Amino acid sequence: MPAPVVANTEQPWDPKVIAAAIDEVSALRADLVALQARLHDSLRAVHADHAAGATNLVHYVGLRRHDVRALQDRLAWIGVSSLGRAESHVLANIDKVLGLLHRLAGRSWTPLSSEEPAGIRTAARLAEAHACALLGGTPKRRSVRIMVTLASEAASDYGLVRGMLASGMDCARINCAHDHASAWAAMVANIRRACDELQRPCPILFDLAGPKLRTGPVEPRPAVIKWRPQRDEYGRVLAPARIRLRPADDSTPATGCWLQVDAKWLAGLAEGDHIELIDARGASRALTVREAQAADRWTECKQTAYVQPGTMLQLQRGSARAPGGETPVLAVPAVENALRLHKDDVLVLTRQGPGRPARLDAQGRVVRPASIPCTLPEVLAQVHPGERVWFDDGRIGGVIRHVQREEVHVQITVAREGGEKLAADKGINLPDSTLELAALTAKDLEDLDFVARHADLVGLSFVRRVGNIERLQEHLSRLDAGDVGIVLKIENRIAFEHLPDLVLAGMHSRRLGVMIARGDLAVEMGWERLAEVQEEILWLAEAAHVPVIWATQVLETLAKSGLPSRAEITDAAMGERAECVMLNKGPHILEAIEALDDILSRMQAHQHKKRAMLRRLHW
């Protein structure tokens, strides 16, 4: 027989309940004020524009040092604010709660200040002022800005840049890890020209490359190119393979299937000529010249072939070989090599390259494990056995088993069935390792000379310590660019764990923002924690009245393929909680900008930060 239900005789407005709540909230307030006093010198060091935000940040951190969930339940039961929306105005919210509790208890209450250090309205105004100072004014149709990473084509294609601005781009990002100063200058010129024509502002963020830890070069594969015609299900040729013949002295980058040959021999080819060859398998093949484009010749072949440098090409006219018509293939496209890694394989990280695949004996046993160098070999002396390693945005995972002077042995623990390919220039993450790396590399310092003259904002990549920020501020001041905005890119575990200190250090500058670099952050913190981590960053930035840039893989499938996934539409809508959402480059970037503009415009009627906006619904 179930136990009888006992009625709770305690009432929410019982004087004892109210008195207990007053005591608990008062004790909490006293703790926050004491923390503010202890950090008095740090708070005095911030820029005057951030004085209120820095103080409120300290109050928020103090609040979150307590588990107030039980108190929140009691306050909600009583019918006053549960502190659940107190991020931007912690002390003012606590004082209002105390005032209401005193009124309910019949006690007198004289608040120390109704706006100490910021209230719900003043905090919103400060947050918007800081967002406008860093990212430009609020767009007409929405409150959230759109930042777009510029592709290399933005240096030469003005129409692309103008189209991006017309579609809704509010800020442009130039990644200093790619291209060079002359290309960046051309991009800046195109942006400024488009801004003048469209009468729209567009601040420019220069993202410093930072000490990116990546895989080094891998031993190249044998130089051989394969082509094959398009066939139907019965093997009949639908379209021949097209092969471009290029002169040997042409050093411009080329894509697709091509062979480089002697320029004089190539110039003598005419439409309709036939070229015979014996491919790498000993198969006889023939090419037909179809088109001339400047110094190049386009040929067609109706058979599959494998061709390598040194393969002889014989010009055939009519039924006879043309005299002097033989020439060797001088070069074919380089084929990127990659290591094939399976679960439980050993991968050796080395100081020097190139990387090599595993060597096997006749019985298939590993004689020498696969190896690959890393771009920052100094980290090999800073890691320890048992620490995790992630490669290529978390596609491949491993655990360090042995650390030697010149190499580190990693056992692969995460890889798809059938194995994964690991190529050169792929990211390496060491989430468990304490790394001492300068946030500003020699390249970054060289780039800063250009960036300081052209940037509205500068992104500090892989920030870990307060000293990283102070060094950037010193260099900007030396270059007479102290008012350039600083964006702290939060992309590793150490930065997340020290975020309050980093933000306080960044507040020494007048213009400051935080970027949630969700790709690296997910690898560092674990995919299962990403939602929780990005929430905490949003809360803390709101407490500091500092704008947030929501970044990495937003509408990525749409930008690359032209068709979005259902999940990324929902993810893009969540960007309404930030002040800016960043898109990466892709061939369909204009469609992605337009889609994001529409999503954010619709969502602002329903959501602002963490608060639901109760717009009238048409059910």
Image: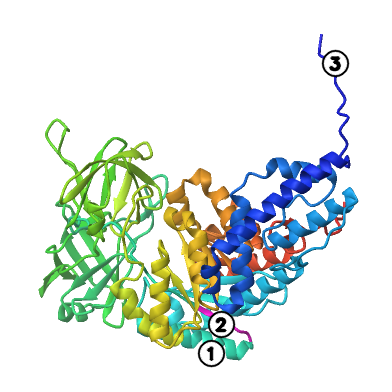
Nearer the viewer's eye, disc 2 or disc 3? 3
Q: Amino acid at mark 2?
A: Arg
Residue closer to the observer: 278 or 405: 405
Q: Is residue 415 above or below residue 135?
A: above
Q: Residue at x 35, y 60 (%)?
A: 240
Based on the displayed image, in which of its 4 quarters is residue 32 positioned? bottom right
Residue 584 in the image: x percent, y percent?
50, 66
Q: Which mark is residue 4?
A: 3
Which element type, helix, strand or loop, lies under badge 1? helix
Lower sequence index among marks 1 and 3? 3
Kindly check if marks 2 and 3 are in contact, taking CB atoms under 8 A apart as contact. no
Q: Is residue 201 visible?
A: yes
Does 246 appear above or below 221?
Answer: below
**Quick check: 327 left or right of 590?**
left
- Residue type at numbered disc 1: Arg
Indicate which disc residue 162 carries: 2
Task: Tell whether label 1 touches label 2 (CB within 8 Å).
Answer: yes
> Magenta segment, which residues?
200-204
The kind of residue tagged 3 is Pro
Q: Position of residue 351 (x, y in %)?
A: 18, 56
Residue that label 1 marks: 193
User: Which of the pair 340/47 is nearer the observer?
Assistant: 47
Identify the element where label 2 is drawn: helix
N-term mark: 2 or 3:
3
Marker count (numbered): 3
In the displayed structure, would residue 546 be above or below residue 492? Answer: below
- Seen as rendered, the residue at the extreme left is 324
Mark 3 falls on what kind of element?
A: loop
